[in-house]
Image (cartoon, grey):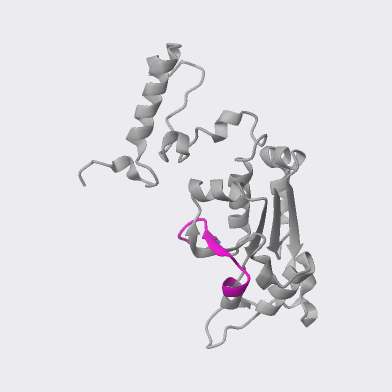
Amino acid sequence: MEIDIFTLFPDWFEWLAEQRHVRNALAAGTRIECVNFREHTPLGAGQVDDTPFGGGAGMVLRVDVLDSALRARYGVDPVRLREDRRVIALTPGGRPLDDELVCELAAEPALTLLCGRYEGFDERIIEHFATEQVSIGRYVLSGGELAAMVVCDTVLRKLPGALGHEKSAIEESFSPALEGRPEYPHYTRPAEYRGWRVPEVLLSGHHERIARWRRERSHERGSPGAPGAERDGEED
Ligand code: ADE
């Protein structure tokens, strides 16, 4: 898989590239590259943004700057690029990132992530260059970089070989294996600590009973795709 990240802060992603599962994914052939769109601006003094038409606070990323950065990277009109790969603008109001979307993205051969700053993107970038908008939550970050890292982290850990243990990414919270529900609780040694005992069933070595117990705990914790659904069935 290839991931290109368009950002004004490429240095931030050096930390990401050092993380173990990301290193594993890179070693297995995944490529992550950053493009600093300030380096491709057709404007003077490295300008990338401008004041909003109609007035208002903040600055808006310019469509001509993204046009020339995307064109420099891919050598095609960015309007056409969308036919070849998913071009994702990270915005607070985009499609919420959930396990289903992560799996969808992990199956793509190539992704382009556009990180906004300031007040965000000129709407024509969204309309004409992006295939979609993705949000990591209903709050506003200072820019799309942290959101892009979340997308990379979640997508890369789905790729074969990224995690030490293949099953980790299969049976985890919100995965199809758990019917989209939160994961069951985990315990490790000591089996008793300050009087707090690990559930006996987990020490029993009885695989079927353990699997049933885990399924039940996962069900108790929530219903598919509903964060906070652990209160399902409870009276307010
Ligand atoms: N950019 C600013 N806030 C964001 C969010 N919550 N998700 C994705 N991109 C963003």
Q: Residue at x 53, y 60 (%)?
A: 134
Depth order, front residue of 142/167: 167
Query: Which residue is at the far bottom?
Result: 54
Residue 80 in the image: state x and y as whole percent.
Answer: 67, 70
Q: Which residues are magenta?
A: 126-140
Splitting the image into 4 quarters, where does residue 131 fall?
Answer: bottom right
Q: Is residue 160 left or right of residue 172?
A: right
Depth order, front residue of 70/55: 70
Q: Is residue 234 left or right of residue 105?
A: left
Whether residue 101 is in magenta: the answer is no
Q: Residue at x 67, y 50 (%)?
A: 109
The reply to whether residue 197 is visible in this rendering is no
Q: Tell me: residue 184, above or below residue 87.
A: above
Residue 110 in the image: state x and y as whole percent.
Answer: 68, 54
Q: Tell me: residue 210, above or below residue 1.
A: above
Query: Which residue is at the far left?
Result: 235
Whether residue 130 is in magenta: the answer is yes
